[in-house]
Image: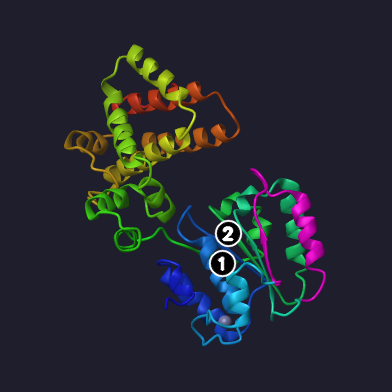
Amino acid sequence: MTMSFEKVLGQSRSKRFLQQVARTGHLPHALLFSGMEGIGKTALAFEFAKLVNCPEFDGLDACDRCASCRKADSGHHPDLLWVRSDGMFIKVDQIRELRRQTRFRPFEGRRRVIILADAQNLREEAGNALLKLLEEPPDRHLFILTVLEPQMLLPTIVSRCCHVRLQPLEDEIIRDHLVARLDIPAPVARDVTRLCGGSLERARWLTEDGRLAHWKEILETVQRLRRLSFFDLFDLTARWALKKEDLEQDLECIKLWVRDLVLCRLSDSEASTFDLDDDLRRIARNLDAEDLFFLYDMIEQALQRFRLNANRQLTVEGVCLAIKDILNGQGSRNTLS
Ligand SMILES: [Zn+2]
């Protein structure tokens, strides 16, 4: 039987650290798990919450059999609280409710564990309310926050937490999981692993609904951009922007591709996500690295703007134009804004 911590793929360094902390018995009031999407932050938080309250904890792992572990697994542990985004944000009312729930001692566990997932979605007021709670942490409580990037939180919240940085998963771990657990054919698993950037969630997503083929199509499209006339480019972006679904994921795909260009420019590493053709490798090596960083930031910002319902066509157009210019050696940092 797979033990608790083993259910979370990879992350061996973070697990070792958490086991050590648990063995000392001196837990911090708050932990912060940071790292990209789909690498197991929430799963690790949950397994650690189980471990903290498992009376059979053997120094390494929760037992998965006792009443406490079973209640947690079935979602009925009275001392395990979840705070998740309500819509796009975690709202101040949710933190007020949390404050109310943490006024009393834990019911049956040694500690009450609060898992606050995607803390980057805390609105300003909610963030401040949480900070107050962390500044005067209630007795025998453990807060576990997960976040994509610590910079997305108030620095005063980060400084109240013991920060555990999770890493993208290794290719081998993802590939083996896809083949052994999800029955994905090995050649597909290999392609997906190269494209998922270390995120198991994205790997799973890519194996569904013909998305792998779709991503390959996008890559062919962006590689073609530098040779397109402006007329064809605008035609292409107009059609692209009409797509209701997955436009954000398309941009994520392009972002990974730009990251590869950066890697190719800065090192001779072959360990890229995508197969850049020789032509593109040659081009990338001669590009201004600053231009590539600019492009990467631009895509990040485009993704944020999508979430705020920005004009999709203008956004896609801006990204595609920047790619075309930069690949053609006409850094657009100064001309486009
Ligand atoms: Zn147990």
Q: Measured from the top left, where is residue 160 in percent x and y?
A: 67, 65
Magenta highlight on residue 174: no
What residue would you read off at disc 2?
146
First-in-chain label (1 vs 2): 1
One can see residue 288 in this view = no
Residue at the farthest top position: 231
Is ligand 1 less than 8 Å from the beta carbon at label 1? no
Secondary structure beneath label 2 = strand
Marks 1 & 2, CB-CB < 8 Å contact: yes
- Determine which quarter of the picture holds residue 102: bottom right
Q: Nearer the viewer, residue 282 or 165?
A: 165
Ligand 1 is found in which quarter of the picture?
A: bottom right
**Horizontal side, residue 52 vs residue 255: left or right:** right
Residue flagged by tag 2: what amino acid is it? Thr
Q: Measured from the top left, where is residue 6 in percent x and y?
A: 43, 73
Q: Measured from the top left, where is residue 63 in percent x and y?
A: 52, 82
Secondary structure beneath label 1 = helix
Q: Nearer the viewer, residue 110 or 188?
A: 188
Few, some or many residues within 10 Å of mark 2 (<14, 14–19, 20+): many
Q: Give the magenta range.
A: 78-105
* Residue ID at (73%, 64%): 134
- Indicate which disc residue 45 carries: 1
Relative to 149, residue 160 above or below: below
Relative to 68, residue 136 above or below: above
* Residue ID at (33%, 24%): 324
- Determine which quarter of the picture holds residue 177: bottom left
One can see residue 114 in this view = yes
